[in-house]
Image (tube, helix red, strand yellow):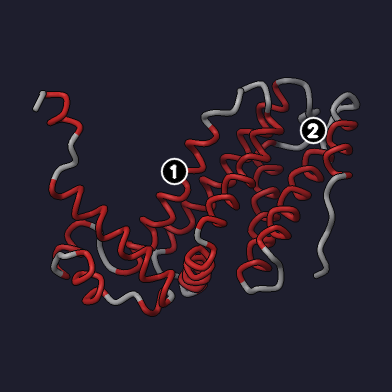
Amino acid sequence: MSETDLLSRPSAKESRRARIIHEAHKMIGADGYDGLSLRKLAKAADVTVPTIYNLIGPKEQILIELFRGWIAQIEAALDQIEKDQPLDLAETIITEATDLIAQDEVFFRAAHIALNRLIEGDESQSSFNNFGQRASGMQTEAVRRAQLQGLLKGAIPAETLGRQIFFNYNEASRYWMTGRHSLAEFRNTALVGVYICFLADATDRFRPELLRRLSRMWIPKV
């Protein structure tokens, strides 16, 4: 085996950690977050409970790691978007997130419900808040690029628009999470939020494109 192969091989610790995360994903999808037992998880991942604590931490930290992986996949997709296409960037944040959810909607619904419950209970608050900051930061970057290209006037701070787009997304996710909206309705509503926020600060040359994209959307019933 070459030195390159040796360096690229995951360590035993990394392999155990990956197994724990994988099995936790399966357990939450099957039984919900409340069904995630560290004893059962240890058995499924072929490790001990102390190993789970040493490599990751308690249940809340396992949930954090699952969401961290989801966000990392979204960020990887954004790297494929041309820097001169800020609206495409803002859209991709929404479409990539919902595309990933579609791959295992049962798991993601259970995970989102758990995440919101933990946030409301102030458990691991700083870690969970970091997800919101990263998500709104992605949209803020898209807005900032649009301002630099003269597509937006800059009358509204990029951070303000980025946060509002995230709040719109978050509210749409709650309707999906509780079963009031389908995943398609979730995506559609979140995209409408992107277009309306961009329209609030759009230059005259950019407004027609935003209105064109908005015209393809529809608003589901509340």
Residue 31, position as x, y percentages in the image: 41, 77
| Quarter residue 28 falls in | bottom left
| Quarter residue 2 falls in | top left
Farthest residue to the front: give it: 1
Q: How far apart are the alpha carbons under marks 2 and 1?
A: 31 Å
Mark 1: which amino acid? Answer: Ala
Of the pair 13 and 43, the residue shown nearer to us: 43
Disc on res. 155: 2
Q: Does 5 sit above or below residue 133?
A: above
* Residue at screen point 76% across, 37% down: 156
| Quarter residue 182 falls in | bottom right
Q: Does 22 sit above or below residue 93?
A: below
* Residue at screen point 79% across, 33% down: 155
At label 2, counting other C-alpha atoms closer than 10 Å, the crowd grade (few under 14, some 14-19, many 20 or more) is few
At label 1, counting other C-alpha atoms closer than 10 Å, the crowd grade (few under 14, some 14-19, many 20 or more) is few
Look at discs 2 and 1 and give the one toward the viewer.
1
Nearest to N terminus: mark 2 or mark 1: 1
Q: Are marks 2 and 1 in contact (CB under 8 Å)?
A: no
Screen quadrant of the N terminus: top left
Q: Does 10 sit above or below residue 60?
A: above
Residue 196, position as x, y percentages in the image: 81, 45
Screen quadrant of the C terminus: bottom right
Residue 133, position as x, y percentages in the image: 53, 48
Disc on res. 72: 1
In the figure, is residue 104 to the left or right of 172? left
* Residue at screen point 84% across, 36% down: 210
Of the pair 17 and 115, the residue shown nearer to us: 17
In the figure, is residue 106 to the left or right of 9? right
Mark 2: which amino acid? Answer: Ala
Residue 148, position as x, y percentages in the image: 70, 22
Disc on res. 87: none
SS state under label 1:
helix
